[in-house]
Image (cartoon, rainbow, N blue to C red):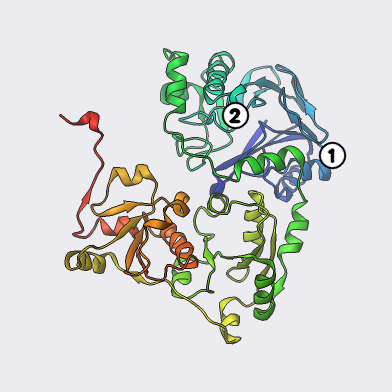
Amino acid sequence: MNVEQIYTGCLSQGAYFIHSEGEAVIIDPLREVTPYVQKAKKAGVKIKYIFETHFHADFVSGHLTLSKQTGATIVYGPTAEPSFGAHIAKDGEEFKVGKLTFRALHTPGHTMESTTYLLLDEEGNEKAIFTGDTLFLGDVGRPDLAQKGADLTIEDLAGYSYDSLRNKIMPLPDHIMVYPAHGAGSACGKNMMKETEDTLGNQKKMNYALRADMTKEEFIAEVTDGLTTPPAYFPLNVKLNKEGYEDINTVLSSGLQALSPDAFEAIANESGALLLDVRTKEIFAAEHLPNSIFIGLEGGFAPWVGELIKDIAQPILLIAPEGKEKEAITRLSRVGFDATIGYLEGGLAAWKAAGKETDKIEQLSADAFAERQKNEKEIAVFDVRKPNEYQSEHVEIAENTPLSELNDHLGKFPKEKPFYVHCASGYRSMIASSILKSRGFHNLIEIIGGFKAIQQTTVPTTAFVCPSTLK
């Protein structure tokens, strides 16, 4: 028996490759399937099944392409209704893979078709569970993604999750391994551990949602508390995973069109394409194409693209480091953004050589900001971190304008006088600065190093104090 976790950090996503006696399964594959095909070839095995734990919302799965290339059967759990050919497993149904057995355990809650796959060895011993988004390490899947109007409330889904965990997962032996679909950083949960695998026994001790003495009412209250609005691209990815999508090679062929500066500019004007700059924040700040938006490959690239670009059909033109164009297009396609229509050949150097204008982001060190803060009156500071980060500690005079909600706060930014923008370390504030610049705010100043750098200065900070703790 061989279980290999294939973890993709930028999506906080775990896929799995398991093989025995010449046969293999892939669980929750990413869209680019070549690595799985190569692994199977190297191990000398045939991929027999593609197990999907549910219709994923935060990424486009590779199930269709992988099945087409290998002939493997796609398997979903009970109640799933895909628009393509797939085997819909019954609760408790078993699948043989070499000497191994996989048992489908219907575990609705995160979604109604959510299914956990229990792995048994050749002697029938329970070895591992592949839980998808039903059970994370330290958390459980959020219950608000499959809500369907008044017929199925968030509380209903949380109740299903409680029953699934108590009836299907918690009775399993403590020694078995838990392999979830996501880890810390994913928007599919709120309290995940940084580890990517653990024993069920330890999760029963560490995971708040698995407390043995927890009532259903307590579970529902805790699981639904503090849920943020899911990214807009989530339902669009569910639709792609359920109904189908283009082969990634077609997407790459379209996106890898090298465009001269003149052609790039002409297509941008004709198509209304978004100019997406994926270089580093330092390079972008120093010089970039006017009206381009920065979301760098160095950070949480794909999730921020999905969070901020509301339409997955939005045409995109890339400004990328040389040799990184394919990576950028691939990572965009993982979250359903297939409409990349080309990239700027030769990058910014070619753009400038063609005599075209550039722009920049004005920046200031944290120390210089501290001096200005002492000497200037009515200084305006905007913190684009999440509300919980802001509440933990923030610059006394700063206003919280979270990056994910930036468009809702545009009226707060002054049009005339200078204002300062920061996040934790600079990635999100550079994204925010690029968006604000494209909206006509040319009087912004980004604080280098963000709040981490500000904390090392004399700038006064404060923390939100919950009223219930006041005496």
Q: Residue at x 37, y 70 (%)?
A: 443
Report the quarter where the N terminus lies: top right
Q: Secondary structure at mark 1?
A: loop
User: Amino acid type of disc 2?
Assistant: Gln
- Nearest the camera: 77 or 357? 357
Where is residue 176, by image quadrant? top right
Cα separation, mark 1 vs mark 2, equals 33 Å
In the rendering, at what x and y percent does residue 351 appear?
Answer: 59, 80
Up-down: is 122 above or below 457?
above
**Residue pointed to by mark 2:** 147
- The answer to whether residue 242 is left or right of residue 378 is right
**Quarter location, residue 114:** top right
Residue sitting at x 69%, y 22%: 104
Q: Residue drawn at (21%, 30%), measured in percent from left and top? A: 469
Q: Which mark is residue 422?
A: none
Residues 189 and 6: in front is 189
The residue that disc 1 covers is: 71
Circle 1: residue type: Gly
User: Does residue 328 appear anywhere in the picture?
Assistant: yes
> Residue 131 appears in which quarter of the rendering?
top right
Instruction: Indicate left or right for 416 with 311 as reference.
Output: left
Horizontal and vertical percent for residue 197?
Answer: 52, 33
